[in-house]
Amino acid sequence: YNDPLVTLAHYFYPKGKRPNSQMGLLLARNGTLDEVHTINTGQRLDKFGYLDKLNGLDHLPYWRDSPCNNIK
């Protein structure tokens, strides 16, 4: 969950040493991912359940070739 005190702490820490922006006992320890996933919900049934974006991006920044970075 979001914690106001942790949010406030971000103003006082340098960028590389800031604490997590969320508070939780099992945060990042229970096998869940912290990325934001945008999934197609069924307006087009042929794309239902497919990943559309990851962290707001429709492509990945890892490889040089465009087809390797596409999210389809």
Image (cartoon, helix red, strand yellow):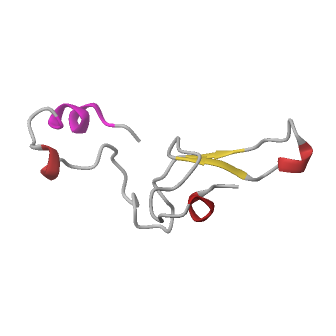
The structure residue drawn at horizontal position 64% and vertical position 55%, both measured from the top left corner, is 71
Residue drawn where x is 53% and y is 44% of the image = 57
Tell me where residue 64 appears, x and y as whole percent: 47, 64
Tell me: 54 left or right of 20. right
Q: Residue at x 15, y 44 (%)?
A: 15
Of 43 and 65, nearer the camera is 65
Furthest toward the right, the residue is 45
Q: Quadrant of residue 43?
A: top right
Image mark count: 0
Percent across and percent down for residue 40 are 75, 44
Above or below: residue 71 compared with residue 6: below
Rendered location of residue 18, percent (x, y): 17, 47
Quadrant showing the N terminus:
top left
Locate the C terminus and report the quarter of the image it occupies: bottom right
Left or right, residue 1 beside residue 56: left
Confirm whether the magenta stretch covers residue 15.
Answer: no
Residue nearest the observer in this picture, 49 or 8? 49
Q: Which residues are magenta?
A: 3-10
Secondary structure mainly formed by the magenta segment: helix
